[in-house]
Image (cartoon, rainbow, N blue to C red):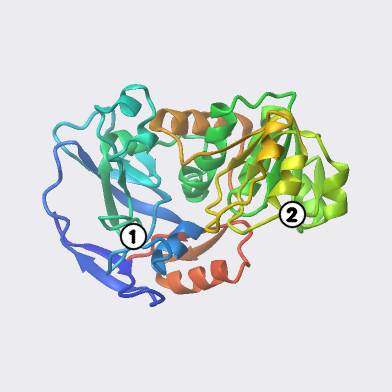
């Protein structure tokens, strides 16, 4: 295989620069994907700055890939050359642990990650185990589908895992790259959806919210005591968790998918009194991701994206860092 061109950072906080690497022989169960589009996620920003202490440099970000299969290992299954697929955070799993055997490949203790211990999707090509290259339905728009493989499955997975019902009253806390997709999914699911955000009400209602509440409006939150069956936290900042917990109905659930770095102050009696629960989840399994894509195709759900060419990747990153993205940023391949 020829060298792969990419964009890499040499140190925390450094700009991305052109970079080449030799991928070595293709593994027996690996596939190689020619990257057509790749979303930029806040997790890419965290990894770029080594906020989680897991980044190795030079670092090639990118885990919201859409592209075409250009090489297949001899033991790969279910894919064809030229097929359009997507790749998210995970790139492999062991296939023999109990979670894998039960279909929870995303909970595999030795799961490989697309941009940790390997080079990610800000590149001409990227590799993964065949199981994690998820075919893209033809009716989904490929050039905006990349964020579905991270942001989309991150918010869709708990809807299924936590048994959210179409009759439920659901709140989405934080309407950004994750939250705007949660509004769309939950609206199509049939729920009564409330957006917790400081954003414009009309814009959020167009995304699927029935109601809009300012996240830090304590008086408004107190009026919602005991109201929600399910709250989905997509933010990565500290909020008044006790007050938000009080808005849950008996047996209601506060579910976290945003990477809140500070410990969350959760009062025990807030959980015990109403038999409420607190939970969290990562992305979904390959099967759940495929189901999410089918649901999105059926209901014509797609991310709201802004586009940049790969050659302007640093401008795209600054746009996202400045909080200007509405609501997801996607890079388009423009390799000469």
Residue under label 1, please give it: 54
The N terminus sits in image quarter: bottom left
Residue 197: numbered disc: 2
In this orientation, which residue lies closer to the viewer: 179 or 94?
94
Relative image position of residue 186 (x, y in whole percent): 67, 34
* 87 relative to 134, above or below: below
Residue 175 appears left or right of 98 = right
Relative image position of residue 197 (x, y in whole percent): 74, 54
Q: CA distance from mark 1 to mark 2?
A: 31 Å
Residue 107, quarter of picture: top left
**Total label count?**
2
Relative image position of residue 160 (x, y in whole percent): 56, 27
Residue 132 appears left or right of 228 = left
Q: Which residue is depicted at the point 63% across and 31% down?
A: 299
Q: Residue furthest bottom?
A: 14
* 187 relative to 330, above or below: above
Q: Which residue is depicted at the point 60% across and 63% down?
A: 325
Relative image position of residue 147 (x, y in whole percent): 50, 49
Say if residue 207 shows up in the picture.
no
In this orientation, which residue lies closer to the viewer: 67 or 127?
127
Residue 148: numbered disc: none
Residue 59, quarter of picture: bottom left
Residue 112, quarter of picture: top left
Q: Which residue is depicted at the point 39% across and 66% down?
A: 50
Q: Earlier in the sequence, mark 1 or mark 2?
A: 1
What secondary structure is marked by label 2? loop
Q: Residue furthest left?
A: 25
Count neighbours of disc 2 (C-alpha within 10 A) and say few if under 14, some if 14 to 19, many if 20 or more: many
The C terminus sits in image quarter: bottom left
* 31 relative to 161, above or below: below
């Amino acid at each position: 295989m020829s060298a792969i061109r990419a964009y890499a950072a040499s140190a925390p906080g450094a700009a991305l620069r052109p970079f080449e690497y030799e991928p070595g022989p293709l593994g027996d169960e690996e596939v190689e994907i020619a990257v057509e589009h790749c979303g930029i996620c806040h997790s890419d920003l965290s990894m770029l700055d080594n906020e989680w202490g897991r980044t190795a440099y030079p670092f090639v970000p990118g885990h919201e890939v859409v592209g075409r299969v250009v090489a297949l290992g001899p033991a790969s299954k279910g894919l064809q050359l030229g097929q359009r697929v997507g790749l998210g955070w995970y790139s492999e799993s062991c296939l023999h642990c109990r979670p894998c055997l039960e279909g929870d490949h995303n909970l595999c203790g030795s799961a490989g990650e697309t941009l940790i211990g390997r080079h990610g999707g800000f590149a001409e090509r990227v590799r993964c185990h065949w199981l994690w290259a998820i075919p893209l339905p033809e009716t989904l728009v490929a050039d905006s589908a990349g964020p579905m493989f991270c942001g989309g499955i991150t918010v869709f997975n708990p809807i299924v895992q936590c048994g959210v019902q179409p009759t439920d009253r659901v709140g989405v806390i934080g309407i950004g790259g994750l939250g705007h997709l949660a509004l769309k999914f939950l609206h199509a699911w049939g729920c009564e959806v409330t957006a917790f955000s400081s954003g414009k009400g009309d814009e959020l209602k167009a995304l699927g919210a029935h109601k809009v509440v300012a996240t830090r409006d304590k008086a408004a939150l107190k009026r919602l005591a005991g109201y929600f069956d399910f709250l989905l936290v997509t933010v990565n900042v500290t909020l008044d968790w006790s007050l938000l917990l009080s808005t849950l109905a008996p047996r209601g659930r506060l579910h976290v998918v945003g990477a809140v770095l500070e410990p969350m102050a959760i009062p025990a009696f807030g959980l015990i009194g109403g038999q409420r629960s607190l939970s969290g989840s990562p992305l979904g399994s390959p099967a759940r991701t495929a189901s999410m894509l089918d649901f999105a195709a059926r209901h014509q759900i797609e991310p709201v994206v802004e586009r940049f060419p790969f050659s302007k990747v640093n401008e795209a990153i600054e746009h996202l860092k400045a909080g200007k993205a509405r609501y997801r940023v996607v890079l388009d391949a423009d390799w000469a």
